[in-house]
Amino acid sequence: MKNVQKLKRANKSLPFFFKDEFKVSFVIIFVSIILLLTTFTFDVVPPILNRGIQPATFPKALLVLIITMTLIVYYLATKNPWKNEKKLPKSFFLTLFSFILFVIVSKTLDFFLAISALSIFVSYYWGEKRLFYLLLVGIIFPIIVFIFFETILGLRFPPGIITNIYYS
Amino acid sequence: MDNLLLMLAPLFSSKLLLVLFFGTLFGLILGVLPGLGPTTGGALILPFTMTLDPLSAIVLLTSIYCAGTYGGAITAVLINTPGTPAAAATCLDGYPLAQKGEAGRALGMATVSSTVGGIFSVIILVFFAPILAQLAYEFGQPEYFALAIFGLTMLASIGEGSPIKNLIAGAFGILISTVGKDFMTSIDRFTFGINELTEGIGFIPVVVGLFAMSEMLTQSTLINQVFNRIALKAIKLPTKEDYKKTWKTILRSSGIGSFIGVLPAEGGTVASLIGYSEAKRFSKNPEEFGKGSIEGIAGAEAANNAATGGAMVPTLALGIPGSATTAVILTGLIIHGVRPGPDLFREQPDFLYGIFGAMLIANILFFIFGFFGAKIFARITLVPNKILWPMIFAVSVCGTYSLNQSIIDVWIMLFFGVLGFFMRRYGFSVVPVIIGLILGELVEGTLRQSLVIFDGNWLMFFTRPIALTFFILSLIALAFPLIRSKKNK
């Protein structure tokens, strides 16, 4: 209880633009405004083909609703500040980085290789140092999943260095 | 009588029995593993259901739903971490009782009350789903629009989070459903020149991202966390004394759970919280709650499993999901070409009663598996996260890719994983996004068709009695959290 109060007090002492409630509300409103502006670029249907409302009207209404509700959330947060969240650990950023690594490797090299690389990377940084288990999660298990999906669902994985060898 | 025979059909089909067996087993494993659960599991297994006929596919998904909801109790009792959100209330008394050396008794009560709650809700489903479906014959486009709005406003009261944040998440879910070609005019919306987005954003990448991938990121922040695990010797059936103490609570919570489940968008989590608090309110020993009360376990577990059958009522009768997992089941129905609604009850009773029967059997099966195998299932929690989550990643990626064979879907899944993590971190529930996404097309479609019928006159919505009733219920649903928070103050 004391810790929560401490965290709340710590949050209160920050300038408003450093507070979580401001940052979160700002991001939501910023993205919503960009999307709202995008809706003005949607094609307009001639009245004879138009059914009910224009295709842009519904998303526009939704975005205005989201912006309004976010403003309410921010207003309420000024009265009752959110508790300050703990700083994210290094392992989180490494996992996030592994997601980016996955996207790059799957696009440029190979889908299977990307799964394998991410699995080994994540498992290692989460504390698994034993070689057998690293091989299990990084190679043996992905091979089982790969073959399982391929044979049961008749799935064809995207071409790549390893996948091409397998298919040839 | 015919319907009863149709319900027993799964018992006479070796294929369906096998599917039920596997689904229950898989559901239990998913329920036991914290962070996974029937919603993620259902979404991951959805591509595999393509190899099955529609009835087997839905039987598989529903058995995962029933068993997964129960499985969460095992982890809640033994490691004080709910395997599923619906088991959160079970921790409050399950773990303290286990600490007193009565883990077997706690799990025995959880197993019995879950089974009773589940069976009770299937009976409710059998009786009420056809009645609701019959009523749905009176529904036109305006009524469906009003019903969908009611379902969305119910999001305000799910869980313990902020109602407005839930509504923002729900509106965001609807917004995702507008991506792609407009289904009425074929005009591109939010596609940003990416061809793959013209078909819209799929349900599976969003669900797997929001549930599985965001959980993987959450687990990455907890890698040094140590759980206090309590050893389980054997599960014990409740004693006569326990039954005497809890039978009223079990029945009450079964009723509460079934009712909450029927309400669109609610589900096991809300049901168990209300079931628990009502058990405490009616108890002769409310001071024991939170310290290992057997009534607390019974109240929470009967309610969350009763919500499974309840949630299937609007899903099958109206095509409105009663919970996040039934949203996955609804997607399964649509993928297999089954259109939920009143026509389903008239044209395919064998299919429908097959599902009812399968749910009934799943409840009995998880009782048997739980009773004899809880010790083994409890050991699954010993699989370290550093091995488990990379494996889940591999299955998630392949499962997401497999539906449309699209790498873009995999990237969308990862994007929603990151988004889901930050949503949860800042108190936005991810469940409303799923409900919003599944209801989005219905909301927009019925709104636009209604406006065509009304010649653009919005006020005409209020001249339709059923639609007006749903709008009034929506206002009540919006006002309810406000009243509740004022009362709490």
Image (tube, rainbow, N blue to C red):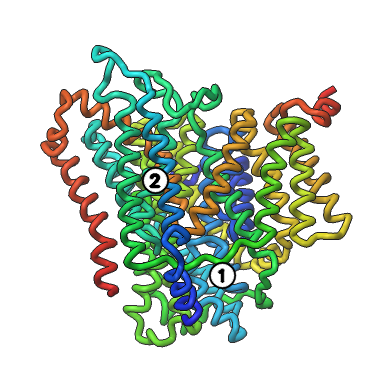
Q: In which quarter of the image is residue B434?
A: top left
Q: Which amino acid does label 1 sit on?
A: Ala
Residue tagged 1: B76
Q: Can residue B388 be seen in this view?
A: yes
Image coordinates for residue B297, horizontal then vertical, percent: 47, 74
Find residue A29 and name its label. 2
Do discs 2 and 1 belong to a common subunit? Answer: no
Q: Relative to B179, is B283 above or below?
A: below
Front position in the image: B336 or B199: B199
Image coordinates for residue B473, horizontal then vertical, percent: 21, 51
Distance, label 2 to label 1, CA atoms, is: 38 Å
Image coordinates for residue B329, horizontal then vertical, percent: 48, 42
Front position in the image: B453 or B367: B453
Question: Is residue B226 shown left or right of residue A142?
Answer: left
What residue lies at 49% left-to-right and 53% top-to-bottom? Answer: B423
What residue lies at 74% left-to-right and 36% top-to-bottom? Answer: A105
Taking the view exactly as shown, the residue that stands out farthest to the right is A131
